[in-house]
Each structure stands twice: as C-alpha cells, then as structure tokens.
Amino acid sequence: MVKGLYQSIRKIWRNPKNVPNLKQKLIKWRKETVIKRVEKPTRLDRARSLGYKAKQGFIVARIKIKKGGRKRARIKKGRVPRKSGRVKFTPAKSLKRIAEDRVARKYPNMEVLNSYYLAEDGQNKYYEVILVDRAHPVIRADKKLQGIIKHRGRVFRGKTSAGQKSRALRK
C-alpha cells in the first residue's frame, strides 16, 4: 500500500535521528530570539492534525523554553530558611503550556489554537504554536473556527490541548 505524504513525514519525525539537518537547525534556533514567527510549520503533519490550515489568518510561532524545574526568587532580607523552596520547585503547568502562554502574551490580537513539540537540546525545548487571527475576515467566515474566536484568552483558561491535560480533562 502506498503511504501518503503526511504519513511519511510522521514516520521521519518519530525518530529525531532521521530528520535531515536537525542538529544544524537546533544550532541556528539557539541563536535566534526566544519567540520567532515562522513562515510555515516545521512539522506539517502535526500542524495539520491540530487544525492548521494554509490560509490567511493563521500564523505559526516557534518558541524556545528553558528545560528543567522552576527556581523561586531568593529571599533578600533576614536569614534564609533551609526549606525556603528555592530549588526542586515544580510548577503546576507543563513547559508546553508555559510556552503557549508566553506566545499568547507576545501576540495579544491572536488566539492560540494549539501547539506541538519540535526538538530539544541540552538547555532548551522548542515548540511551535499555531495562532489564529480572530478579526480576520477569512477566519470569521470559517464555521469550524467559530467556537475559538467567540471567547478571548482560551490559552489562559486552559482550553488548549496542553491546558486540558494539565487540568486532567483528557482521558
């Protein structure tokens, strides 16, 4: 049986060693800004499965986020208690959800549709976030996107896939 294009792309991305020039891409991405708008998705199969369409009103942003747990701010005055919780402090949100939040703050006129994992190196994880322009006439005319554009700030209310997972709503 003949495989389709998206099925072939999915198979390549299953094993990161198969992805051509991924190491060079990671070196390039590390030097770029934290949030960078990209012309088209790096993983087209994943973006399409999450609702991306190649039409006006959709944009994709790549975000670099530091790996590891969170560090609390250091206490400035007085003695520092041993159990002040500076290290080994785990946030309630996943890194993917934190990445979605940051991209949503960078693009306030856009609505986060979804996001997906790209790659990681020793320090950072890279995600791509799909955003939709709520005010664009092409998006307003699309019947499937009416639920998304009706309410603002769905990423901050945990309505994306990563948000639902952290709220234990996904089976």
Image (cartoon, rainbow, N blue to C red):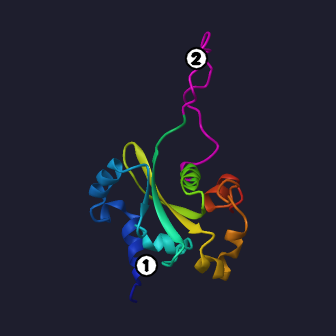
Quadrant for residue 100, please give it. Answer: bottom right
**Residue closest to the eye, 163 or 54:** 54
Judge the density around disc 1: few (<14), some (14-19), many (≥20) Cα neighbours within 10 Å: some
Judge the density around disc 2: few (<14), some (14-19), many (≥20) Cα neighbours within 10 Å: few
Quadrant where the C terminus is found in the figure: bottom right
Magenta part of the protein: which range? 71-96
Quadrant where the N terminus is found in the figure: bottom left
Q: Looking at the image, do the residues carrying marks 2 and 1 touch, with CB atoms under 8 Å apart?
A: no
Q: Please identify the dominant SS of the magenta region.
A: loop
Mark 1: amino acid: Tyr
Quadrant for residue 146, please give it. Answer: bottom right
**Residue closest to the eye, 58 or 144:** 58
Q: Position of residue 29 (x, y in %)?
A: 35, 53
Residue 90 is a magenta residue: yes
Q: Secondary structure at mark 2?
A: loop
Q: Position of residue 72 (x, y in %)?
A: 58, 29
Q: Which mark is residue 6?
A: 1
Q: Position of residue 119 (x, y in %)?
A: 40, 56
Mark 2 or mark 1: which comes first in sequence? 1
Question: Is residue 56 rendered to the left or right of residue 160?
Answer: left
Q: Position of residue 45 (x, y in %)?
A: 46, 74
Q: Is residue 169 above or below residue 125?
A: below
Residue 100 is a magenta residue: no
Q: Which residue is mark 2?
A: 76
Mark 2: amino acid: Lys
Question: Is residue 31 rendered to the left or right of residue 40?
Answer: left
Residue in the image at 59% along x and 80% along y: 138
